[in-house]
Image (cartoon, helix red, strand yellow):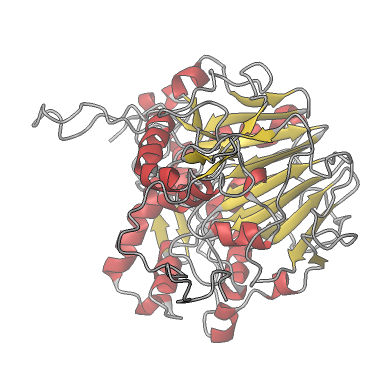
Amino acid sequence: MTDSTNLESTGWTRRDALKLTGWSLGGLAVGGALTEAGAGTAVAAEGCADASCSCPPGPSCDWTDEAAAQRYSYFDKLPAFAPFSHRTRTTIAPLAENEMRISFMGSANPPPSPARRMMSIFVEVGWDPEREMPLDQFVFDCGSGVRANYGAMNVGFGRMDKVFLTHLHGDHMSDLTHIYCFGPAEDRKYPLYVWGPGPSGVENPVWSQNPNQPRYFEDGTRAFCGHLREACRWHSESFSFEPTGYLGHRAPTRESWGLPCEPVPVGYDSPDDGYAMIPIELDLQNYAKGENVAYENKATGVKITWFPVIHARKGSIGYKLEWRGRSMIYTGDTKPERLSLEAARNGGRGVDVFIHEMDAPAEVWAMKIRGLNDPAKVPKLVVSLVETVEDSSHTPQGAFGYLLNQIEPRPRLTVATHFPTADDTVACAMKSVQQHCKVYQGNDPHPPEAGSRITWSFDRMVISVTPERIVEQRAEVNEFRLTATLQVPRSAALTLKTPRYHYTDKFGVTSGNPYAQIDLSTGIPACNCDHTCNFREDGY
């Protein structure tokens, strides 16, 4: 048990810790570790030292309406957003000069459902009328299945070259494989940049008994990218009969993007090639020195800083994006902790949009996983297993309300994400949040009380942020569309590089060679040597 002296050394008293770890939510006590990020001091849940810190009983929630579990009515009523320009029906829907657009390409907590993919947020800022493109754009996390939503939302690979990972759980990074592998086959013929946490520094618990194992695992973003790049070698080589880069491409530098390290690819790729993967590692040791800038592009005006959060293993981080007076925070997954609060207070200026994970109480999450509509029917063992996950990693809905009430000034819009969003779960969560602060859910750009507006994310929800108002929208997409609008460079100085696998004909013309890596000896040709036809060469 951690004593009060150790608690106070991290900036917390025992009573402070218990306020955040001893919630009674729907009859479930949620305890666990709560420390200052990186401090390594565990605080176990225990009874209050005196009655003054006891919490009220959890709100009563209705789970009898089975239809409410299969819909999210609020999202269905939002105004429509068209991802394609109304002018051409093919190009990108333009942003206003002072607009920041936040699109939820994935919003679920595990397990996913047909309605919701894993976590991913796409952020665009401003508009460049000459290129007919946003001034800058970013991917925050890219969990399983989200690439389908990016394509439907008209976000192609060429717009997905800057990926910011909060941590390396599969539900936050698994579609990076698809983004990396297929980008050079379409319009990302330049490197993929991946920001993320540095090594955790957690000692391997087996090492002391088995010195043949490493004392510390290579579990940071550079190691992750290096292994992913090699795991995708078969794919990248097999596609390299096509051009995978541009001659004359001007790669960004550490100075031009304000990076914390030199942008060096993993593997053997040229730093201007589409199959180059460039990790930008954000190390906790640097944060302790006050170095927390991940990206600062003076040409576009975007600055992205980062801060540690508490989730599963040391190294998990959240991000704050600032641009021309607009601001957004995305915490990723985290237990209640105070660095997110400090980022949201923003030196007394507040932020426009505060995106923070919210978990349902363990018994509700377990109920949803089992497909039931009564928490009492969930086996206690299942609830216990889910509770251990929540203890190590997440912010339940009552704690979310407490955290929001600590932010002054309040965000213009608070977004709960990584949540099993449906009519029944949102109604229950709203009751928990309202026990701590006055909030309402609605699309009124002029809320009755500043900072009282809250919403729950859903796949393909689009949030438009301007100085005058914040509007939530529902993207209308063609679910059968195969790809987004390709972004072809307009610079005459850019020409495609010679493919890695190529041949030169008798006239000196070099072309990609699709047959260089295969054995055609058992193939059946379209036409035989006697000019008889087996099947049409044109594919019909």
Does residue 478 appear to the left or right of 282 in the view shown?
right
- 400 or 183, nearer to the observer: 183
Q: What percent of the width, then of the height, locates residue 186?
A: 61, 49
Furthest-front residue in this view: 530
From the viewer's side, name the closer residue of 84 and 522: 522
**Image location of residue 43, percent across then percent down:** 36, 38
The spot of residue 351 in percent (x, y) is 74, 39
* Res 115 seen here: yes
Residue at left offset 66%, top offset 68%: 481
Number of callouts: 0
State the residue at coordinates (63%, 56%): 150
Q: Residue at x 67, y 37 (%)?
A: 344
- Image quadrant holding the C terminus, namely bottom right
The answer to whether residue 436 shows anywhere in this view is no
Q: Residue at x 63, y 28 (%)?
A: 305
| Identity of the residue furthest to the left in this view | 209
Q: Is residue 267 left or right of residue 70?
A: left
Q: Quadrant of residue 193?
A: top right
Quadrant where the N terminus sits is: top left
- Please state which of residues 152 and 237 is positioned toward the viewer in this rendering: 237
Residue 1 left/right relative to 333: left
Nearest the eye: 392 or 62: 392
Residue 500 drawn above or below residue 64: above
Q: Quadrant of residue 290?
A: top right
From the top left corner, tell me how far across and down residue 371 is, in percent. Answer: 42, 78
